[in-house]
């Protein structure tokens, strides 16, 4: 059994103000026996203003949230997935990175993943997102190891692109992570079903820590951090309040599910439609 903790946050647009609540929940998770702790997307800063982000964000090398959480992982002796941080980059166009970090129990960064798929959508007449205007997309998928367990890293909108998850599973992933700041417009309809589908299709555990509540005056998030079994069963739901959700994973369930439905081995080549 591996005990994991999904940290659910209501991060605002001030990284310094967000950090104490994040650290307190990580420490609480470790105190309750979690070996692997996961925080949501944009743990450090949820903002809809690029100008404000320019003022408050930092490059990876000087980011205070990353430094503090690396120190906490080492002090607590836990694996920590920082679901993502919004970070300044040296891109000529000034766009930021939306980057996950996997931290080991010594506080070292063992993997990084930059979100590949950008949330460029018109959810409604009043809710419009152009993530690619502020963030540069990544281009490399990431398979990491947590205590020898292969873990595929993804972020939020990636969940709508099943081929990414299939490739990670076929590369060996037993756990898929989907830290998110999911829209309140799409969350009630799509959040759970998408996560369950990715678990069923791959025979992986899916762990999805989430932002929740009214993050800023213009941005609210769905919450409901989920842990889903390889058979598609919801093992835990974090509800709508900030906090931690603990769940014990039996990794033998991965092989059991894939033995019953060996779809990962049944790919066939086919021609595209005319």
Image (cartoon, rainbow, N blue to C red):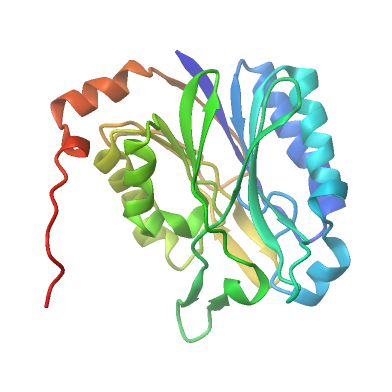
The correct choice, above or below, for 80 with respect to 63 in the image is above
- In x, y percent, where is residue 28? 70, 25
Which of the 4 quarters of the picture holds residue 31?
top right
Could you tell me which residue is drawn at 22 percent across and 38 percent down?
264
Question: Quadrant where the C terminus lies?
Answer: bottom left
Left or right, residue 136 beside residue 70: left
* 153 or 205: nearer the viewer: 153
Closest to the observer, 241 or 121: 121
Indicate the quadrant where residue 75 lies.
top right
Q: What residue appears at the point 51 percent right and 59 percent down from the top-left corner?
A: 116
Residue situated in front as seen by the camera: 185 or 257: 257
Tell me which residue sits at (37%, 36%) in the image. Answer: 171
Q: Position of residue 27 (x, y in %)?
A: 74, 26
Q: Is residue 169 left or right of residue 20?
A: left
Q: Residue furthest top?
A: 1
Residue 133 position in % (x across, y down): 63, 77
Q: Position of residue 273 (x, y in %)?
A: 13, 73
């Amino acid at each position: 059994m591996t005990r994991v903790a999904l940290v659910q946050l209501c991060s605002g647009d001030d990284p310094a103000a967000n950090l104490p609540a994040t650290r307190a929940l990580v420490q609480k998770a470790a105190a309750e026996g979690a070996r692997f702790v996961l925080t949501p997307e944009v743990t450090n800063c949820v903002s809809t203003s690029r100008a404000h982000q320019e003022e408050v964000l930092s490059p990876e090398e000087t980011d205070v949230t990353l430094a503090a959480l690396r120190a906490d992982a080492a002090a607590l002796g836990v694996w920590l997935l920082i679901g993502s941080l919004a970070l300044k980059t040296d891109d000529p166009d000034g766009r930021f990175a939306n980057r996950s970090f996997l931290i080991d129990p010594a506080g070292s960064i063992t993997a990084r993943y930059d979100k590949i798929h950008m949330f460029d959508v018109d959810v409604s007449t009043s809710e419009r997102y152009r993530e690619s205007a502020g963030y540069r997309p990544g281009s490399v998928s990431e398979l990491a190891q947590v205590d020898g367990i292969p873990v595929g890293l993804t972020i939020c909108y990636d969940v709508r692109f099943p081929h990414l998850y299939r490739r990670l599973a076929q590369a060996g992933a037993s756990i898929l992570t989907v830290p998110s700041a999911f829209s309140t417009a799409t969350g009630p309809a799509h959040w759970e079903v998408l996560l369950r589908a990715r678990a069923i299709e791959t025979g992986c555990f899916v762990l999805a820590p989430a932002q929740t509540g009214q993050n800023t005056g213009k941005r609210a998030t769905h919450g409901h951090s989920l842990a889903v079994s390889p058979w598609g069963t919801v093992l835990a739901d974090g509800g709508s309040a900030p906090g931690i959700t603990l769940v014990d994973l039996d990794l033998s369930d991965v092989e059991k599910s894939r033995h019953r439905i060996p779809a990962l081995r049944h790919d066939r080549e086919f021609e595209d439609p005319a």
